[in-house]
């Protein structure tokens, strides 16, 4: 008797949650980022995503014909929006707070997902993602660093000719390089060091 | 008759070159980098490497039990040695010439091979390569940038406190970021712009 009850329990099929439309779509998109951030692009499968979203494979394929299509939408929907850089009164504090947000985005589920795509995809597949990466990551972060630098110029703690686009790539470049080459997770003290040792000397007025 | 001659020609087996010891090993190591730079880590096979080296698979497996072992030795042997930074009389020219060498290394066969490993390998596999990457790429390039900066301090065209390790990572960071995110191939004019817009302001004396 005990045995048969146990057997019955063991045979219960996995629960598929009943959701429709946007709610189910959101669950699938979240599951795609979650899976991508853990198993990487190479390990990502539509089956795995469906299982993670507690739905059927058909429900996924009905909406997205391939994992490429699904991941483009998942990144589009899931990447954090870095929309404005608050004024904290000085270039040092503005950059520090902005870098902390960039760091938190890098190490979020969608940040890990993005890096799986950036690093693992061969060039032809990466092409599929280039648009969303430019629109959702490169352009917004460049725009925020430009905003902070221009505010510093107006404030007077940044030299007036520090507006070359290469200047806005220094922090993203250092953050990518050190996380990739040295496994740095950019704790606050490393961010502060980057600002004091690199960005302040780079940006402060020549006569400073 | 014509047909049979054509058939005979078509049936000729691929020529296996007769080489031994170091000569054959070098050919296999070169073939591994060549293959890695074209098909990437994901597409790399011992069969493909043997074919490329015009030898048998057994000759490869006899020396290296896995493609990981082979690639570690291939990178160790094939990565260009950046051993010294010549004095060109100014920090601008020293950095310009050094960056051109780094760019040429990045876009060499072994540079593309290295990037396949850096970008495609999952973390556990990448562990296998971390040592050779640190010894053959990160440490030597950091050392060369340090050498150039310290020479500038002695010369007087670099501020005396520009020796933080983060300063030495700015150029590698920008070069990796822009090649990865924007597909930049770092032509000479972009290198010159990076030096004039970023490195000279970052390094030149505060009172400059």
Image (cartoon, coloured by chain):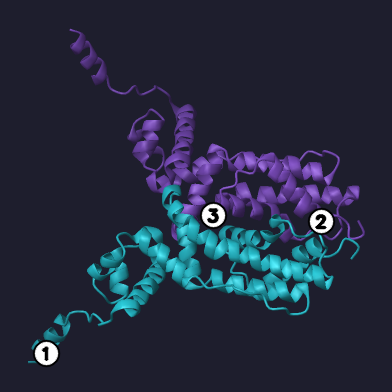
Chain colours: A cyan, B purple
Between discs 2 and 3, the one toward the N terminus? 3
> Dividing the picture into quarters, in which one does residue A66 lie?
bottom left
For the point 26% across and 66% down, the residue is A62
| Residue A11 position within the rendered picture, expressed as x and y whole percent measured from the top left | 14, 81
Give the side of residue A74 with respect to residue A57, left or right.
right
Name the secondary structure under disc 3.
helix
Chain of the residue under the numbered disc 1 shown in the image: A
Label disc, if present, on residue B176 of the rendered structure: none
Label disc, if present, on residue B130 of the rendered structure: 3
Q: Quickly name the residue at label 2.
A: B201
For the point 62% across and 48% down, the residue is B137
Chain of the residue under the numbered disc 3 shown in the image: B
Name the secondary structure under disc 1.
helix
Quadrant the N terminus of chain B occupies = top left
Q: Nearer the viewer, mark 2 or mark 1?
A: 2
**Is B98 or A68 nearer to us in this picture?**
A68
Q: Quickly name the residue at label 1.
A: A5
Q: Is residue B121 visible?
A: no
């Amino acid at each position: 008797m005990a045995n048969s009850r146990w057997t019955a329990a063991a045979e219960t099929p996995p629960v598929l949650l009943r959701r429709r439309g946007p709610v189910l779509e959101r669950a699938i998109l979240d599951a795609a980022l979650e899976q991508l951030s853990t198993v990487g692009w190479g390990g990502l499968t539509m089956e795995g995503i469906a299982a993670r979203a507690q739905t059927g494979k058909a429900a996924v394929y009905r909406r997205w014909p391939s994992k490429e299509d699904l991941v483009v939408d998942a990144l589009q929907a899931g990447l954090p929006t870095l929309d404005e850089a608050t004024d904290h009164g000085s270039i040092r504090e503005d950059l520090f707070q902005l870098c902390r947000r960039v760091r938190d985005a890098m190490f979020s589920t969608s940040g890990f997902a993005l890096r799986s795509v950036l690093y693992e995809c061969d060039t032809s597949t990466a092409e599929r993602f280039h648009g969303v990466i430019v629109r959702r990551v490169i352009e917004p972060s460049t725009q925020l660093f430009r905003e902070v630098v221009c505010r510093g110029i107006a404030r007077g703690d940044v030299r007036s000719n520090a507006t070359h686009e290469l200047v806005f790539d220094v922090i993203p470049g250092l953050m990518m390089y050190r996380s990739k080459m040295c496994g740095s997770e950019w704790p606050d003290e490393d961010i502060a060091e980057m600002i004091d040792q690199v960005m302040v000397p780079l940006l402060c007025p020549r006569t400073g």
